Image: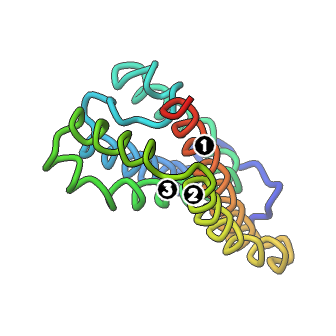
Amino acid sequence: MIRVDDFVTPGSPAWWICLGLSLFGRSCDLGSTYAGTPNLVLEGNPFAKRLGWRLGVPLNVGLCLIIAALPMMAISLTTSSLLVAARNLQSVWLMRTMGELRYRQWMSEQVSETPILTLLGCFWGESGLTALVGLPLVLFSDWELVPFAVGCGIMIYGVLVAFFTTLGVWRRRF
């Protein structure tokens, strides 16, 4: 049985499983990002935007190769990545219909017209409530790998959404 703090040997069956999970999760995130913003105009992560596809894809593959040796990290990364992909896909249809630039302009207008406390309250509320879903998994996991790692992944997703939406609001409003 693999525990939360275990390291698995690269090339072992557990490592290949963790690698497959990580690559699947990151591929879903990157694929949904590409579907919505192939030119990264709408990318909320400034680091990923700066890297671009040419450096971002190999960096993500390298990250997966390393993280595969840490099952807790691999499962958490996969969970967060799948949640990010789901969030991306929620708006891809609109991004594709309007186009990246027109969607960004429209969204910026909506952000600028919404009272800041309402806007941040909604974004932080969504993020906080999502993170709260992961909390009982972590607290009651009894340090079992899968529920603990999935709970961490959900909480990390909530924190990342709060951080990057706040950063995006800050850039558009101030």
Residue 147, image x, y percentages: 70, 73
Quarter of the figure with the N terminus:
bottom right
Give me the C-alpha separation between circle 1 and circle 3: 29 Å
Residue at the (40%, 30%) spot, across then down = 57
Badge 1: few (under 14), some or many (20 or more) residues near its Cα, within 10 Å?
some
The image quadrant of residue 135 is bottom right
- The residue under label 2 is 123
Q: Is residue 101 above or below residue 139?
A: above
Give me the C-alpha separation between circle 1 and circle 2: 8 Å
Q: Amino acid at mark 2?
A: Phe
Residue at the (54%, 52%) spot, across then down = 115
**Front one among 18 and 80:** 80
Ranked by sequence position, the earlier of labels 1 and 3 is: 3
**Front one among 130 and 64:** 130
Residue 61, image x, y percentages: 46, 34
Ranked by sequence position, the earlier of labels 1 and 2 is: 2
Q: Amino acid at mark 1?
A: Thr
Q: Under tag 3, what secondary structure?
A: helix
- The residue under label 1 is 166
Tell me, yes or no, if residue 133 can be seen here: yes
Please state if 34 lies on the left or on the right of 17 as rendered: left
Q: Amino acid at mark 3?
A: Leu
**Front one among 165 and 135:** 165
**Front one among 51 and 96:** 96
Residue 165, image x, y percentages: 55, 45
Are the residues flagged by discs 3 and 2 in contact, CB closer than 8 Å?
no
Q: Which mark is residue 21?
A: 3
Residue at the (51%, 50%) spot, across then down = 22
Are the residues flagged by discs 1 and 2 in contact, CB closer than 8 Å?
yes
Q: Under tag 2, what secondary structure?
A: helix
Give me the C-alpha separation between circle 3 and circle 2: 28 Å
Q: Is residue 39 above or below residue 2?
A: above
